[in-house]
Image (cartoon, helix red, strand yellow):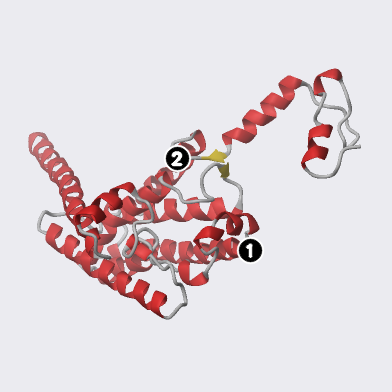
Amino acid sequence: MCRQGFLWASCASRSPASGAWSASGTPWRGTSERSKISKMSDFWIMRPFSPVFFLLLALFLLILIAAAALLRGRSERTKALVISAACWLTLLGFIAYKYFLSIDAELNELTASMGGFNWWGELPLQLCNINMLLIPVAVLKRYRPLLSFCFFVGPLGALMALVMPGTGFNGYSIFLPRMLGYYGTHFMVMIEALAIAAFGLYRPRFRDLPLTMLALFVIAFAIFCIDMLLRVSALHPKANYFFAVETEGNPLLELFHSWIPVPFLFLLPSIVILGVYAGVITAGFALAERFGAGKRKKQA
């Protein structure tokens, strides 16, 4: 007799090719059938750049394109309200996702060395999800420095989270609540930030770049102060929103820290990189507008 647990499972699966019966009393499936089921299951395992990753990316981009087409000709106020409503719904989903994290025994075991789940460590204050709070303010108030911050930082932060998922979010079925919450939140933040330009509410200009970098500096410093407050108060001794206190092993931040070994200040090179990245994107918009203007002149 096999014991329950691992040995029981091993015994139950020992001789499928011989036509033996499974431990549940049902005949074994044929090898080819089991192989097909295994491949179907593997398809839904979420990893960066896996088939299901690109499937979800395409789905969310299609949602953005469809929304832009449906809202064509509508007022800027209507477009701003649609983006804001999407952010508020994402925030509600984010709260539900965090609740499921709080009761996820597997994740708590995986992250035990990092302190496990702590509600104070799950606030929407990361580089990506803070945009759920900032985008509605930016589009409703039309505050240009905040619009530029959300447009440039939102998709970049979300994409970084999608291609470099943390512990417990890589190599698991997309249908797990924590996986749906993690990837759903970040894909939504990405398209909500892109919608600012796709809906015509913002067009990047080179004059925006200094203000974008300043906005990142101010917001990052505010988050650093929150990190320190959470640490000093012992509400969350390892608070590290925006990676403003510790690098947590990030290779790029480790490099910056070797240059400037001071909390928060080691992020300064990141702000310079953001300026270069934003400049490249802005140049692309400028070239597209110039090409479009030249084409319209020829047609006229």
Q: Is residue 125 above or below residue 183?
A: below
- The crowd level at tag 1 (other Cα within 10 Å; few <14, some 14-19, many 20+) is few
Q: Residue 274, how many percent across, how many down? A: 21, 53
User: Which corner quadrant holds the C terminus?
Assistant: top left
- Residue 130 visible? The answer is no
Indicate the quadrant where residue 205 lies.
bottom left
Q: Residue 94, how many percent across, how many down? A: 50, 63
In the rendered structure, the answer to whether residue 28 lies left or right of residue 106 reads right
Which disc is residue 48 wearing? 2
User: Which corner quadrant holds the N terminus?
Assistant: top right
Give SS at disc 2. loop
- Residue 31 visible? The answer is yes
- The number of numbered badges drawn on the structure is 2
Q: Residue 97, how many percent across, how many down? A: 55, 61
In the rendered structure, the answer to whether residue 285 lies left or right of residue 107 reads left
- The crowd level at tag 2 (other Cα within 10 Å; few <14, some 14-19, many 20+) is some
Q: Residue 259, how many percent across, how many down? A: 20, 54
Residue drawn at (58%, 34%), measured in percent from left and top?
Answer: 43
Front position in the image: 44 or 259: 259
Front position in the image: 247 or 63: 247
Residue drawn at (37%, 48%), measured in percent from left and top?
Answer: 159
In the rendered structure, the answer to whether residue 241 lies left or right of residue 28 reads left
Mark 1 lies on residue: 103
Residue drawn at (83%, 39%), measured in percent from left and top?
Answer: 8
Front position in the image: 184 or 222: 222
Q: Is residue 233 above or below residue 243?
A: below
Dot 1 or dot 2: first in sequence order is: 2
Front position in the image: 138 or 232: 232
Give SS at disc 1. loop
Q: Amino acid at mark 2?
A: Pro
Indicate the quadrant where residue 295 lies.
top left
Q: Amino acid at mark 1?
A: Ile
